[in-house]
Structure formats: C-alpha cells, structure tokens
Image (cartoon, rainbow, N blue to C red):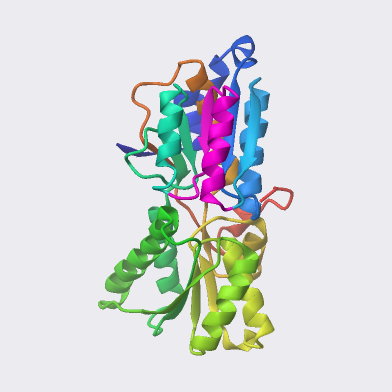
Amino acid sequence: MRTILAAATLACGVMAAQGASAADAKTIKIGVSMLTQTAPYYVALQTAIQKRAQALGATVVTADANGDMLKQISDVEDMLSQKIDVLVMDPKDAKGLVGATKEAAAAHVPVIIVDSSIDPSAPVLTTIQSSNSENGRLIGDWLIGKVKGMDLRIALLSGDQGNLVGEARRDGVMDGIVEAQLRQLGHAGFTIVGQGWGGWTQEGGIKAMEDLLTAHPDINAVLAENDSMALGAMRAIKDAGKSDKNILVFAAADGQKEAVKLIQDGSYGATGLNDPAVIGKMAAELAVKAANHQVPADTPKITYTPPVAITKANAAQYYHPDALF
C-alpha cells in the first residue's frame, strides 16, 4: 500500500521516535550507505540522518560509494561486520543492491531505503522518498500553463541509466504535460529532441547540455531530473552564448536552494520539492524505532512526502538560504 504522509504526521504519529528512551537509543548503531556525496542533495541527506539519529542517542557509521555499485555492496558488507542494528541505504542500482539487502536480512538487520528506489524483491522495511511521479505531474501542468501552445522541443537531462527514480521523475513530467495539454488545448504533443546523462551533478549537466546544444540547436526547453543538472545546463547555455534564446530550464525535482533563488528571480522555471532534511529525519526516526522493535505492523512499503511544485508564485516559502541544500 502506498501512502503520502506529511513529515509532521509521521514524526508525531507513526514514527513517534521520541517514545524510545535515551537509554535504549544509546546502544543503537545505524549504518548509512550513500551512493555518492558529489552533489549537495546527498550531503544534506546524510547530514540530516546523522543529526537526527545522534539527537536520539544513536551512533552512526557512514560510507560513500562514490557512484560505484560494487563499492556500495562492499560498504554494506563492512557495516554488517561492524554489527550495525539498522541499515539506511540510498542504492546506486535498483537491482544490483538487492543482494546486499538480502545479506542484511540474513543478519537480522532491517533495511530502510531513502531517496532512490529498489527492486520489489528486496526485503526492506520501507522506502522513504518524495512522490516523484506526482511532483512530475505538477511540473508538467505548470509547464503547459507557462508556454501555452508552444511547439515544445525538449532536451532531457537524466541521472543514471536504469535509475528508477529518474524514470519516475521524467515519466511524471511527461504525463503532466499530456494531461495539461489535453485539458487546456484539446490536443497533446511534444518532442524530446535528445537525452543526456549528467550523473546527477552540475558538472555532468554542463557536459551533457553542451552535447545536446551542439546536436540540437533548436532546443527551446530543458527538463532535468534534478536541480544540480539543470543548474549545469544553465551554465552551458550561457557559455554557448545562447542566453538570448529564452530556453526554459526546469527540473522534475529537488528544491536546491540555488535553484529556488533563481526561480524567485525569474531565470529558472520550476522544480519539484524533494527535501533531504525531511527524508533524513524520517529515516533516522524509523531506524531507531526498528532497532527497538517498535515499528507498527502497518508501516507502508513506500512512504511519500507531500508533492509540491516550486514556482515563482511560492518560491519564497521554500527558499532557505542557510540550509545545506
């Protein structure tokens, strides 16, 4: 059963992590396996998990896979050898990390997936993430309201091949575009002129966008699967001397503070809300509950944060200049 839960509801109700006594929590060791730390989002997510877990009295062991699936598998094995009580993982590959979750299950270590998705065959307690498809639909709806009947020629910037989150994000945006066009215009259609792979980073977005601009000079919109790649695309457009072409750049997700500031200023289109601070806090609280055998039997297999499209109209509400992300 899939459920959308507000962070406050989860914190006060389902999680109720404060119910675990400090004496119980002090003995808990949580392993945090991150696929990378090369983008601000991942740094903020790991920091949020650590901060909340430590506030609850738990100790945290972290590992950075540096985008290498085999290293992430090795990281998990090392954490299990250190006798962690719970594993929190942002998996590099949806299928490739299933074996690691099975090793954890064999060691009686509950697994919580954050941000990314994992294959349904993986024995995990739950996945905590933003509602990528719903965020995407909201962004698609915003786009058509912005461009009306424009003949859209979209360059797509994707993260990693085979990444289920990236697929859900772009599919959600495209579904939103079609539904909005049918509702507002009575017909639907757009062109994805090309797809570039940016590895979720700003530097990757620059390189992928440079290639797309060369191959498709008639691009009039850029859809990125996260803000970091979209910010890279904006840099590539500027460096190519095409800032005057009014290419509309927007993202399916994240809400990175630099992007939100540009949305406020009117130079960046929109993005979906994927707050690492909320996801990290929820994951840490659930990890403490799991270690204390206090997880409700009806905990959903996927726990979504509320979907939001951040646009110029509401960007001030989501701009936090002092945030890590």
172 relative position to 63: left or right: left
Please tell me whether residue 242 is drawn above or below residue 97 in the rendered image.
below
137 relative position to 255: left or right: left
Q: Position of residue 70 (x, y in %)?
A: 52, 47
Q: Nearer the viewer, residue 104 or 304?
A: 104
Locate the N terminus and report the quarter of the image it occupies.
Answer: top left
Please tell me whether residue 313 is drawn above or below residue 187 in the rendered image.
above
Residue at left offset 60%, top offset 25%: 82
Q: Position of residue 133 (x, y in %)?
A: 38, 55
Please identify the residue farthest to the left as the structure is shown: 186
Q: Where is residue 4 in the image (x, y as percent from the top left)?
A: 39, 40
Q: How many marks?
A: 0
Report which quarter residue 142 is drawn in: bottom left
| In the image, residue 92 lies in the stretch drawn in magenta | yes
30 relative position to 261: left or right: left
Residue at left offset 66%, top offset 53%: 40
Q: Which residues are the magenta region? A: 67-93
Residue at left offset 57%, top offset 45%: 71
| In the image, residue 72 lies in the stretch drawn in magenta | yes
Q: Is residue 309 visible?
A: yes
Please identify the residue farthest to the top as the structure is shown: 23
Report which quarter residue 236 is drawn in: bottom right
Q: Is residue 267 visible?
A: no
Please tell me whether residue 317 is drawn above or below residue 232 in the rendered image.
above
Q: Nearer the viewer, residue 35 or 288?
A: 35
Residue at left offset 49%, top offset 84%: 219
Q: Position of residue 301 (x, y in %)?
A: 36, 35
